Image: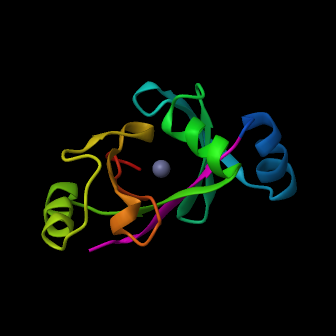
Amino acid sequence: MFARIDHLGIAVESIEDALALYEQSYDMVVVHRETIESQGVEAVLLDVGEGHIELLRPLGPDTPVGKFLERRGPGIHHVAYQVTDIESELARLRAAGVQLLDETPRIGIRGSRVAFCHPKTTGGVLTEIVEPAEGH
Ligand code: ZN
């Protein structure tokens, strides 16, 4: 079962320009900043109640987010649902016919374990499943 929306991933050209909106205009608080080489992004996490906004700046044009920006421009990139047991959740989704881009979880932001689902089997929405690290 999905416990809640963990975060929305937003593709941006510039973290600093995006922070002018999210920090200054929206008054959100940055709680984490990290370069995730395996996903080809610099990511910034802001708090919204118990959920988050995840700003994603591609490390290069050939990364998944770099290609997304070139095709679609800045905007909502993915939705992430939080779970407590990612292995059983992935097995359940697989059995339900959802195609997984990650057959086994990989390490995401802030030490979480994550896996992405192919948007062609999720109604066009790139969907991330997140099991937070202890304490988050
Ligand atoms: Zn994400």
Viewer-nearest residue: 16 or 69: 69
Which quadrant would the N terminus be assigned to in this image? bottom left
Q: Where is residue 102 drawn, in percent x and y?
A: 26, 46
User: Looking at the image, is 87 positioned above or below residue 14?
Assistant: below
Residues 69 and 133: in front is: 69
- The secondary structure that most of the magenta stretch takes on is strand
- The residue stretch that appears in magenta: 1-12
In terms of depth relative to the viewer, which is nearer, 46 or 36?
A: 36
Q: What percent of the width, then of the height, locates residue 81?
A: 40, 64
Q: In screen coordinates, is 99 left or right of 13?
A: left
* Residue 73 image position (x, y, % from top left): 70, 49
Residue nearest the observer in this picture, 117 or 4? 117
* Residue shown at the point (60%, 66%) measured from the top left: 49
Q: Is residue 116 left or right of residue 37?
A: left
Magenta segment includes 49: no
Figure label count: 0
